[in-house]
Amino acid sequence: MAEALSNAVDTVFSAPVARSPRFWKILARHRAAVGGMAVLAVLAILAIAAPLVTPYDPIHQKLSDALLSPSLSHPFGTDYLGRDILTRIIYGGRYSLAVGFMAVAFGVAIGVPLGAVSGYYGGWVDLVVQRFVDLLLSFPGILLALSLVAILGIGLENVVIAVGISSTPSFVRLTRASTLSIRQLTYIEAARALGARSGVIIFRHVLPNALAPVIVQATLSLGSAILLAAGLGFLGLGIQPPTPEWGSMLGEGRNYIFSNPNMATFPGIAIFVAVLSFNLMGDGLRDALDPRLRQR
Amino acid sequence: MFKYIVQRLIVAIPTLIGVAIVVFLMLRMLPGDPARTIAGVLASEQDVERIRVQLGLDQPVWVQFVDFITRLARLDLGQSARTSQPVLSEILARLPYTVELAVTAIILATAIGILAGVVAATHHNTRIDYLVSAASLFGVSMPVYWLGLMLIVVFAINLRWLPAAGADQPACFILPSFTLASFVVGLITRMTRSSMLEVLSQDYVQTARAKGLHEQRVRYVHALRNALLPVVTVVGLQFGTLLGGAVLTETVFGWPGIGQLLIDSIFSRDYPLVQGIVLTFSTLFILVNLVVDVVYAFVDPRIRYG
C-alpha cells in the first residue's frame, strides 16, 4: 500500500502530468470516466436549470395527485403529498451534489495543509497530527458523522461539517505521504538553501506537486461523501423534508414501501448513478495520472 | 508471538483512552446548556436541575472527567436519561443482534468476495473479469439502505418469500445479512482480484508451473495462500465500515440491534446512551483490528519477526 502510494507519487512528479496534453488524451480514451463525467454534467445542469426543465414545484403539495403511478405526465409517479418524484429528484441534485462538494472541500481544506505540515516538519508535530487522525479513524464508518450530528444538531451546515470531518483523515494521510517523499527532493533543498521560509516552501513548492493524488482521492471521496450525506438524510438526521434531498426522500419513501415503492426506488437510483459516476471518474483520473496502474 | 500480541495490546490502549475522552467531551460540547438540551424545551427548572445533578454537570469539568474514567473502569456507563436503566444493560440486551448480523455479513462478504476475486483474476481480461469488476464497482457505489429496501420490495412484497422486518425467525436473517454484506463485498472482491493478479505474476508461480504442477494446484494452493494476506487486512478494516453499515441496515429492517438503539437515542437526546453506544462500537472496532493484526502476524511470519 505505502509502496504503491509512493510509486504513484513518484510517477506524478516525474512529469507535470496534469499540464501535459497526454493526461487529457489518456483521460479522454477512458470511456467509462468520460461517461461518468457526462452523466454528472447532465445531473448538475438539470439541477441548476431545474425550473426550466420541469413544470412542477418540488415542494408545493397537491394531495389529489398523491401516490400516482408512473405516467406520461409524471414519469416517476408522485409521492404521498402529490409532488412529482422526478421533479424532486432534479431539484434534489442541488442539495445532494452540493453537500458532497462542500463536504469534500471542507475535508481538503483541513486535511491537505495538516498533512503537509505533518509530513514536512515531522517530529512531535507529526506525532500529534497522526494520533489525532488515528483517533478519528477509530470511529467506524458512518459513526463519526452520526456522533458529530448528535452533538451539532440536525441541519445542512452540520451535515457538511460532519461529512467533511469524516473525509479529512484520508487527505491528511495522502498529503503527508506525498510530502515525505517531496521533502527529500533537490529543489526543496535548493529552496531552503536560498533561505525560503518553511511556510513558503510548503505552500509554494511542496503542495502544488502533491496535488495529483489528492485530486484522485477527492473525486473518489465525492462519491462516498454523497453516500454518507444521503445516509444521514435517510436516517432523518440530515437535510430535513420538505427540502428535496435524495437521502431524506428515500427515508420518506421507506414508509410507503408496501403501497408505493417508486418513492424509494427513484431517489436511490439517483444516488447510485451519481456515486457510480464519481467512482468511474476517479478511476479514470487515477489511470491518467499513474501509467503504472493502467497496465493492469 | 506472545511478545507481539502484548505489543499490539499496549498500542491499542492510548487509542481506547482517546476514544473515551472524545465520548466524554461529546456531552460537554453540546451547544448551550447540555442539561436543558437533554431535558427538552418543555421541562421545568427543577427537571433541568435534577438532570444536571444526575449527569454530574454541576461539578467542575476535571471532577466530571475523573468520575467518568473511574466509572468506566468499572464498566459503569451511567443511566439512560429516558428509561433510567443502566446504559450497559440496555446495550448488552441489544448487542447480540448486531454482532450476529455483522458476523454473518462479514462471513458472507468474505466468501463471495474471495471467490469472485479469484475467478476474475484467473480469467484476467476476459468477459468474466469485466463482469466481476463491473459488479464490484456497482456494489461499492450502491447505497446499502436502498438495496435493502429494494430487496424488501422484491422478496418480501412481490414474491412473499421472506419477512420484511423483525428478528424472530431464522428467515429474518437472510435479507439483512445480504444487505449488510453488499456493503463490503465489492471492496473485498477488488482487493482479492488485484492481489491475486500480483501473486500470479511472481517468479515462484512460474517455477511451480515450470516444474509441471497442475494449474489448479498452482492457483489455489501456491498463489491463493499468499494472495489472501492483504485481503485479511481489508476484511479487518472493513469490519468498521460494516458496523457503521449496521446502523443503516438495522433501520431498514427494523432489526433490534444497537444501531437502531443509537438512532433512537439520538432522536430522544438520550446522551448517556448515545455515549455508551459510540464507545461500544469504537471498542469493538479497535478490538477486531487488534485480532486481525494478531491473525496477520500468525499467517505471515515476516510481520512477527520483522
Image (tube, rainbow, N blue to C red):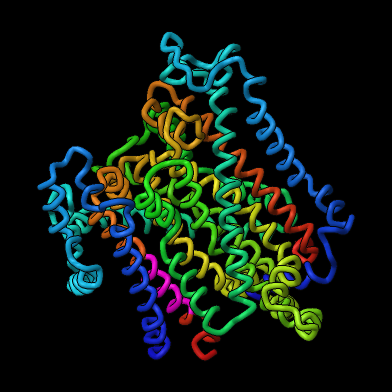
A90 sits left or right of B176 in the view? right
Q: Is residue B246 visible?
A: no
Q: Is residue B76 visible?
A: yes
Say which quarter of the image contains residue A286.
bottom right
**In the picture, which quadrant includes the N terminus of chain A?**
bottom right
**In the picture, which quadrant includes the C terminus of chain A?**
bottom right
B276 sits left or right of B89 in the view? right
The residue located at (44%, 76%) in the rendering is: B295
The residue located at (20%, 72%) in the rendering is: B63
Outermost residue toward the right in this view: A21
Horizontal and vertical percent for residue B123? 70, 57
The residue located at (64%, 68%) in the rendering is: A175
The residue located at (37%, 83%) in the rendering is: B10
B76 sits left or right of B162 in the view? left
Say which quarter of the image contains residue B107.
bottom left
Residue A12 vs B171, above or below: the answer is below
Magenta span: predominant SS is helix
Residue B301 vs A87, above or below: the answer is below
- The stretch of residues the image draws in magenta is B285-296
Queried whether the magenta region covers residue A153, the answer comes back as no
> Looking at the image, which is closer to me, A156 or B176?
A156
Horizontal and vertical percent for residue A246? 51, 34
> Looking at the image, which is closer to me, A272 or A22?
A22
> Looking at the image, which is closer to me, A207 or B159?
A207
Residue A13 vs B298, above or below: the answer is above
